[in-house]
Image: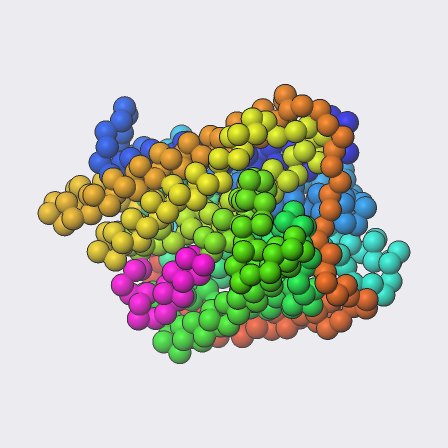
Amino acid sequence: MTNRHSLALAHIGVAVAAFGVAAVMGVLQALSIADVEFPRRSEELYYVSMTAHGVLMALVFTTFFIMGLGYVFAAESLGRITGRAVGWLAFWIAAVGSVMAAVTILRGQSTVLYTFYPPLQAHPLFYIGATLLIVGSWLWGGIIIASYRAWRREHPGVPAPLSIHGLLASIIVWYLATTGLALEVVGMLIPWSLGIFDKVDPLVARTYFWWFGHPLVYFWLLPAYIIWYYVLPQVAGGRLFSDPLARMAFILFVILSTPVGFHHQLADPGITAGWKLTHTILTYAVMYPSFVTAFTVIASLEVAGRLKGKKGLFDWIGALPWRDPVFSAVALAMIAFTFGGFGGAVNAAYAMNSMVHNTAWIMGHFHVTLGTTVALTFMGATYWMLPRLLGRELRPAVLARLQPYLWFLAMAAFSTSYHIAGMRGMPRRVYSAALAGEQGAAWHGLTLVAAVGGVLLFLSASFYVIVVFTTWLGGKRITPPAFEFAVPLLPPTTPGVWDRFGLWTIVAILLVAAAYGYPLLQLLAHPRFGSPPFKPF
Ligand code: HEM
Ligand SMILES: [Cu+2]
């Protein structure tokens, strides 16, 4: 490969391949839950497949895609990737780690679901593989930071391009998040799986996991927000409504995305109500930058419609390029987030959480947020990048055009039915809703609708994978279009308070220390008994 974007392309290729494999598993799970028979259906296959689906989608697809996107932004906005050779090393470390983890899952030795809560125990190579994926991503973050610093030396006194501002925010969030994960995996799970410790404390492990698990969602979301702020208005023919608001939003995520993890542990013992409440309040605070994002991006799109001469209250919406898959994918992803955000506010509320905790509602929720807001944005970003990276036209164009709409409609069926089933008490992660007797009969219709949604989602996923690989191998050659980014209505001239990354990182570290220090000390000081490992199959 002589393409100057080969590093980015390699990452995107792995991401799309992981997505494709995981999509097959997703549809099998949806059928199984609805009690639809298919060859070799079994409990074991269901849990093996769900572990693979969750890990490949939530960890491999997202991380590789974000790394690829980061290299594109560094090359285009900074004009450089400092340490390309290290970039390839990081790619191979992450790829080998992902394959190691995937193989132990598919061999049935790591059926621990993507949250890998102990005392469920996986094969040591699962934990080591996951660690390597993270190590690769750490090196990637270092390369982006090094590229930024080299650019900075040549451009003193100007604010970083917005894509890089957002990317640096994502990387800081990622380093803060993965510190928790490293404490859990390296400090507890790897030695335990190797037999060095015979017991592990599930509560401490879960606390480290959610220290990682919530900012993880912002590590997915912030790169999507970069596309919303910086690419979408340009694709629509508009301007970025406000540059400082965008910069502020990214910094608020740096500060607020981590000290909120207890909202996943509202039902866990051993953490006092006061700390749970503190994290809940911070969770509501971290919704604010998302509201700012929705406002700014929609205003930017309105500018696009106005520039096309629309004067009415809503007629500018029809003037947007809904037939362009880059636009439709990203815009539908944003619409999905209004539902996702609503559900998230329910999950975070102490009392309402107890109605939906660990029910099918949760998987309805994260398929609209991660599975649509993030994933559909990444699909739109793929359609934006591929012609520019490869110098080829998207092909087959009609599949690319249909794919985002099909995903959106299929997800509406899939996710809405699981939300309702969850409110009727259906647990998540169940092999077959029909097993629950009479109660299950009440869920069965909903799970069937969800299964139809799952099949259509799979169809849409196949369209995406087909478009990516057909374009890559056989798309019509064109002069690559330029990477163009949205221009703010009022471009910034000097760096402001939101450009002070060093300061905000310190604030973020202090907040994490405050939010986790004392509760963790309490947990570690309790008399602790620990649990021996369990392997369900
Ligand atoms: C073809 C499209 C998809 C289908 C049909 C599908 C279907 C499913 C089903 C049926 C489950 C099982 C939930 C349960 O029993 O509790 C599941 C779990 C999950 N899915 Fe998807 N999904 C799809 C796409 C995605 C995407 C795009 C993502 C993220 C990028 C994603 C992330 C997850 C995660 C993290 C889990 C949780 C696994 C666990 O509980 O350990 N899915 N999916
Ligand atoms: Cu969370």
Q: Where is residue 529 shown, x and y percent of the image?
A: 34, 61
> Image quadrant of residue 409?
top left
- The answer to whether residue 463 is above or below residue 58 is above
- The majority secondary structure of the magenta stretch comes to helix
Q: In the orientation shown, which residue stands out farthest toward the bottom?
A: 274
Q: Nearer the viewer, residue 433 or 226?
A: 226
Q: Nearer the viewer, residue 207 or 370?
A: 370
Side of 17 relative to 9 (left or right): left
Residue at 46%, 64% (x, y): give it: 261
- Whether residue 399 appears in magenta in the rendering, the answer is no
**Residues in magenta, as a range:** 338-357
Classify the position of the N terminus by image quarter: top right
Confirm whether residue 431 shows in the render: no
Residue at 83%, 54% (x, y): give it: 151
Q: In the orientation shown, which residue stands out farthest toward the right?
A: 154
Residue at 77%, 27% (x, y): give it: 2
- The answer to whether residue 244 is above or below residue 161 is below
